[in-house]
Image (cartoon, rainbow, N blue to C red):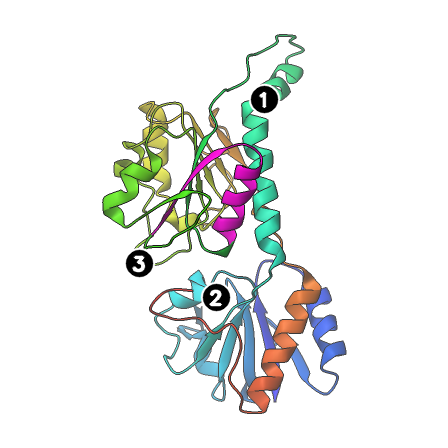
Amino acid sequence: MSIALIITDRDLTTLSSGLQKRLPNVNIQCWPNITEPEKVTFIVAWQPPKQLDEKSIWQQFPHLKAISSLGAGCDSLLGDTSLPSNITITRIVDRGLAEQMAEYVLAIILSLKRRLYDYFKQQQKQQWQPLRKIKGKKVAVLGIGEIGHKVATTLIACGYEVSGWSRSQKQHDLYATFYGKQQLAQAVKDVDFVVSTLPLTLETHYLLNNEFFKLLNNKTWLINVGRGEVLNENDLLLALANNDLQGAVLDVFSTEPLVKGHPFWQHKNIIITPHISAITDQTTVIEQLANNYQLLTDNKPLKNVVDRQKGY
């Protein structure tokens, strides 16, 4: 029995050594040095390559039973049609992510309201020009699960007027809630900030598109901390050119890292951060992966199993 780490965008030293310490009798194999694929029953994946020698990468693991995403998102796994349907998919659930996300959103909104980004630009030009702060305090949070609800309640505690929107009906005592495509316009009417914490599903793919931007006023800022492909990037550029909204703060993108030369990099009304609004704690990751591997070995139900139909 063996665990394979198929993670293509980072150094695996901390993760592999942590798992090895937690599971001393288990062979931890790291991509691309998978020397015994026939022994792999559990894979940890993030942005895995789709093919290997013109074949699906999963074909080289004949005894694979489960795959865990390295994070909360499972987009690359759920979108891979070559992944056999009998393979269980799990994800990492870190309760601390909601608080981190709420801090990030609050920090961004305060920075926009107090014009800190404008002052930074002035500093580069050695300009001294006081600016009026932005007065608006109406926020729509799209996606009011655990993370979105934490964002909403944090903003309310700081004096913001919040509305929440979800794909299916949800009730919260502290703020007005809307649901379904038919109520999306009501949720974002006359708001100053729209925050997306939405997961990526068939229903949310490119939900933030040209039609959506027409619902906003031209002073609205979009903040996307959910999933990159919820946003149609070309439509955002068009909407900004048409003055349909004020600007966007983006922490997630359709392709990561954001490629050099992408028009977002130099756009005067787009602020970029490198997918850091919430970072999963490594200790939490290692513990959850080790626990699920042991459950798999003992033929017990795994934790944090992903519903392929819902997408999370």
Q: Amino acid at mark 3?
A: Leu
Query: Which callout, 2 or 3, points at the residue further toward the start of the chain?
Result: 2
Describe residue 288's horizontal placement relative to residue 236 as left or right: right
In this picture, is 5 found above or below 186?
A: below
Describe residue 305's horizontal placement relative to residue 203 as left or right: right
Near-viewer residue (170 or 40):
170
Tell us which disc is closer to us: 1 or 3.
1
Do the CB atoms of the residues marked 2 and 3 lie less than 8 Å apart? no
Tell which residue pokes out farthest to the left in this image: 182
Query: How far apart are the alpha carbons under marks 2 and 1?
Result: 43 Å
Disc assigned to residue 114:
1
Do the CB atoms of the residues marked 1 and 3 lie less than 8 Å apart? no
Query: Which callout, 1 or 3, points at the residue further toward the start of the chain?
Result: 1
Q: Amino acid at mark 2?
A: Pro
Query: How far apart are the alpha carbons under marks 1 and 3?
Result: 37 Å
The picture quadrant where one finds residue 237 is top left
In this picture, is 244 found above or below 309?
A: above
Q: Amino acid at mark 1?
A: Arg
Q: Secondary structure at mark 2?
A: loop
Q: Which residues are magenta?
A: 147-166
Q: Residue at x 64, y 9 (%)?
A: 127
Dot 2: few (<14), some (14–19), or many (≥20) neighbours within 10 Å?
some
Regarding residue 36, the answer to whether it shows in the image is no
Residue 210: horizontal and vertical position, in percent?
28, 36
- Identify residue for label 2: 49
Residue 95: horizontal and vertical position, in percent?
60, 60
Residue 248: horizontal and vertical position, in percent?
45, 33
The picture quadrant where one finds residue 32 is bottom right
Tell us which disc is closer to us: 2 or 1.
1
Disc assigned to residue 202:
3
